[in-house]
């Protein structure tokens, strides 16, 4: 699923790691001592963190880059089950890029760039650059959340990096998708049944607050993107007095969060595809896909029809009607020329496969196809499903999803059958252990949202703004981007966020910026 808009092939923070830590009995040396107080967290809060070099072996590029930047890394022991803190433990890996402007140090800032389930240790590197001089006033902390990356990783052995597929054109295709999603859920049940109840956003928020306490900080600041905005909002709801400066970029509607968070995103992606087609038409001399937007869309629809008849041969992959919409949606979360060009090249390859029987993928497309159609990044999809399914229940009746798709097929002809499709959560082995978090509080926060966002659509950011009554909404108009601050390079947005982080004062009222990105 790519509602964070940044799949493994196109992550805003490109460098990842997946190094295992022992589960359940606690991988850190002090695991036994920290759980000595079986009925509370006091033992955990007294643990000593050993900060060390980040690189683990010559192949660990992320660790090497962190070391080169002057970051240090450590492991935090936390309860597997916060309802039974005296029971099993897990370890969480984190990095820290310490403040260099110590005289004006604000405190710690925890980062989360989304997913859910994206590793976070490397996030300190680009975000320190994006923050400019104010970054030197914070200890930036990048955390691999529980069961992600180096933090006791969870992997269900999926044959894919994401469950996201189109339901197809008829009920037979929908039945195949239903069987596929049921199998994904069964794989997680077989391999990780004892862990799944503890893979939740509320537990990650508890981990965050435990980390704050261990570091001896009275409050923590927070910068979250996409799913990270939901995590940040949950933290403010659970620990309202411990949040300092909070920025939520490309925000989720907390009342509509869950496995069906993309359900309302179909229309935004239809609009984005038309915008992209117009751009391609203006560059017809380069791509040859049509001199008008309608001609370009006709090419896309022709590929769609061809993939419905038989899978397209792209390298050693087979692209069918159920995987094709993902390839389109995956590149619609960014309106910059580079991303438009990448999608145009993808469509060129797919058209060749439809016309001649086979085609060779670009490097970018090959990366995306590997993510989508192999198990190379099974852990990514596994933990994403575990978090979403563990947070919010969904309908367990496949007929509900088919009915929803049919009702919206005319208005969402290319994407509705994907954004409204069934997920593994319909077959998850248990319902969430806790009720979904109702976010409604007055904690100050700056919410950043672009009007053209195709993942967390604009009205979802408005909903987060209403839920956080002490917040301000910074709207980037005339832009289609998911992940604005730093990533998009809009001087107005970046300046406003940096000003807030510098002095902790929110703007007097909501305000707008105009969508102009840097090259």
Image (cartoon, rainbow, N blue to C red):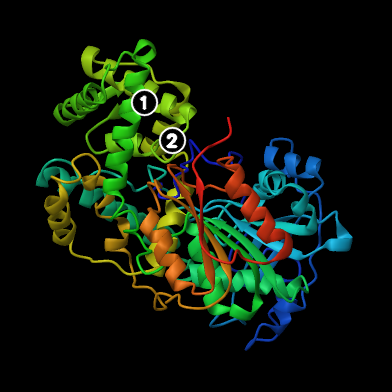
Instruction: Examine the rendering and report whether any part of residue 17 can be seen.
Output: no
In the rendered image, which quarter is residue 91 located in?
bottom right
Regarding mark 1 in the picture, which secondary structure is present there? helix
* 478 to 430, vertically: above or below: above
- Other-residue count near label 2 (Cα within 10 Å), few / some / many at <14 / 14–19 / ≥20: many
- From the viewer's perspective, tell me whether residue 385 is left or right of residue 236: left
Regarding mark 2 in the picture, which secondary structure is present there? loop
Q: Residue furthest right?
A: 103
> How far is disc 1 from disc 2 in space, using C-alphas?
10 Å
Q: Disc 1 designates what residue? A: 279
Seen at 23% across and 19% down, the residue is 354
Where's residue 412, x and y in %?
Answer: 20, 45
**Mark 1 near mark 2, Cβ–Cβ under 8 Å?**
no
Q: Disc 2 designates what residue? A: 335
* 293 to 286, vertically: above or below: below
Depth check: 348 or 153 in front?
348
Where's residue 466, x and y in %?
Answer: 43, 70
- Other-residue count near label 1 (Cα within 10 Å), few / some / many at <14 / 14–19 / ≥20: many
Seen at 18% across and 41% down, the residue is 413
- From the viewer's perspective, tell me whether residue 411 is left or right of residue 126: left
* 53 to 43, vertically: above or below: above
* 347 to 436, vertically: above or below: above
Where's residue 24, x and y in %?
Answer: 58, 68
Instruction: Examine the rendering and report whether any part of residue 210 can be seen.
Output: yes
Identify the mark at residue 449; answer none if there is no mark: none
Comes first in the chain, label 1 or label 2: 1
Depth check: 201 or 518 in front?
518
In the rendered image, which quarter is residue 248 located in?
bottom right
Task: For the C terminus, give its image quadrant.
Answer: top right
Depth check: 385 or 244 in front?
244
Q: State how many labels appear.
A: 2
- From the viewer's perspective, tell me whether residue 3 is left or right of residue 232: left
């Amino acid at each position: 699923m790519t509602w964070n808009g940044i799949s493994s092939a196109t992550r805003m923070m490109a460098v990842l790691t997946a190094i295992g830590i022992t589960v359940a009995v606690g991988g850190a040396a002090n695991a036994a001592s920290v759980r000595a107080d079986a009925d509370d967290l006091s033992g955990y809060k007294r643990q000593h963190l050993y900060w060390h070099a980040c690189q683990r072996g010559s192949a660990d590029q992320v660790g090497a880059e962190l070391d080169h930047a002057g970051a240090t890394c450590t492991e935090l022991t936390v309860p597997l089950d916060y309802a039974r803190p005296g029971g099993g433990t897990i370890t969480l890996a984190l990095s820290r890029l310490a403040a260099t402007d110590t005289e004006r140090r604000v405190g710690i800032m925890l980062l989360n760039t989304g997913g859910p389930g994206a590793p976070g240790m490397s996030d300190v590197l680009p975000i320190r650059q994006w923050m400019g001089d104010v970054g030197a006033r914070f200890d930036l902390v990048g955390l691999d959340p529980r069961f992600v990356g180096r933090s006791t990783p969870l992997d269900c052995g999926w044959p894919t990096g994401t469950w996201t597929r189109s339901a197809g054109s008829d009920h037979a295709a929908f039945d195949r998708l239903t069987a596929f999603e049921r199998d994904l859920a069964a794989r997680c049940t077989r391999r990780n049944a004892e862990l799944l109840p503890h893979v939740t956003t509320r537990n990650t928020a508890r981990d965050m607050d435990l980390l704050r306490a261990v570091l001896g900080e009275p409050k923590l600041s927070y910068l979250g993107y996409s799913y990270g905005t939901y995590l940040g909002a949950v933290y403010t709801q659970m620990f309202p007095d411990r949040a300092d400066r909070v920025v939520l970029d490309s925000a989720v509607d907390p009342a509509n969060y869950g496995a069906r968070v993309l359900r309302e995103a179909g229309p935004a992606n239809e609009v984005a595809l038309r915008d992209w087609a117009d751009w391609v038409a203006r560059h017809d001399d380069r791509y040859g896909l049509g001199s008008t937007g309608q001609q370009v869309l006709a090419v896309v629809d022709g590929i769609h029809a061809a993939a419905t008849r038989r899978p397209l041969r792209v390298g050693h992959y087979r692209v069918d009607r159920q995987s094709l919409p993902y390839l389109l949606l995956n590149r619609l979360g960014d309106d910059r020329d580079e991303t438009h060009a990448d999608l145009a090249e993808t469509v060129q390859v797919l058209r060749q496969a439809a016309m001649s029987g086979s085609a060779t993928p670009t490097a970018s497309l090959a990366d995306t196809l590997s993510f989508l159609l192999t198990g190379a990044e099974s852990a990514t999809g596994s933990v994403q499903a575990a978090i979403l399914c563990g947070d919010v229940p969904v309908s367990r009746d496949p007929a509900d999803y088919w009915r929803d798709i049919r009702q919206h097929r005319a208005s969402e002809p290319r994407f509705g059958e994907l954004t409204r499709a069934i997920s593994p959560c319909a077959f998850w082995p248990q319902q969430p252990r806790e009720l979904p978090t109702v976010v409604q509080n007055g904690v100050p926060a700056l919410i950043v949202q672009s009007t053209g966002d195709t993942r967390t659509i604009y009205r979802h950011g408005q909903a987060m703004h209403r839920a956080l009554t002490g917040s301000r909404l910074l709207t980037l108009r005339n832009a289609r981007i998911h992940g604005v601050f730093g990533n998009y390079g809009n001087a107005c947005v970046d300046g406003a966020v940096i000003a807030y982080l510098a002095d902790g004062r929110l703007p007097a009222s909501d305000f707008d910026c105009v969508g102009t990105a840097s090259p």
